[in-house]
Amino acid sequence: MLSIVLFLTAALPYPLQGGTAHADGPKIELKTELGYKGNIKQDKWNPLKLVLTSDRDISGDIVVRIQNTNGMGQDAAYVKHVELPKDTAKEITIGVPGYFFNKDNNEITFYEGSYKNGKPLPFASGKNTSKRRR
C-alpha cells in the first residue's frame, strides 16, 4: 500500500507547482506588408513595411532573416534599429529581394537592445518569428 501511495504522489502533479506564466516583458504588435499593394517583383528589391506598436517604451533591433530559396547565393539578414514609444505605431521599411516567401524561409525577430547582445522578444500579435532554422 505504501508503494502505491508513493507512486501516486510522484506521478500526480502537485497543485501548487506550475501555473500560467505571465511575461513581464513588453507586448509588441507587428503588422507586415510585402511588396507593392501585395504584389512582389521577382528578382527585384521590394519594400517590406513593418508596423510595430509596444505597450511600453523600448528600443532594439528588428531583424528580418531570409533563407536563400534559389540555391544561388547566401542567406541574408537585414537589421534596423528602432525606438518604440509607448502606444505609438512605428512604421519602418526594409528593402528585401523578390523571392517566393513562405512560413519556412523567413523570420522576423525583435531583439531588445541589439541583436548582438539583446534578448529576442516574442510578438504579442502579428507574424511571430517563423519556423527557426537550426
Image: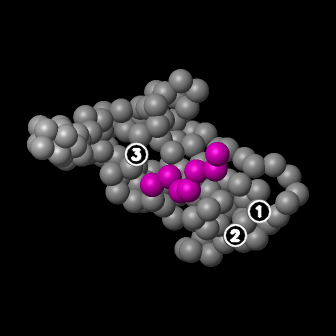
Callout 1–callout 2 Cβ contact below 8 Å = yes
Q: For this rendering, which residue is in front, 91 or 110?
A: 110
- Mark 3 residue type: Pro
Q: Is residue 36 magenta?
A: no
- Could you tell me residue 32's position as x and y percent? 48, 61
Within 10 Å of disc 2 (Cα), the crowding (few <14, some 14-19, many 20+) is few
- Mark 2 residue type: Phe
- Could you tell me residue 27's position as x and y percent? 30, 44
- Could you tell me residue 74's position as x and y percent? 81, 49
Q: Is residue 83 above or below residue 74?
A: above
Disc with the residue nearer the chain's start (3 vs 2): 2
Quickly name the residue at label 1: 69
Q: Which image quarter holds the C terminus?
A: top right
Label 3, secondary structure: give it. Answer: loop
Kindly indicate the quadrant of the structure image that contains residue 10. Answer: top left
Tag on residue 33? none
- Magenta span covers which residues? 128-134
The answer to whether residue 55 is seen in the rendering is no
Callout 3–callout 1 Cβ contact below 8 Å = no
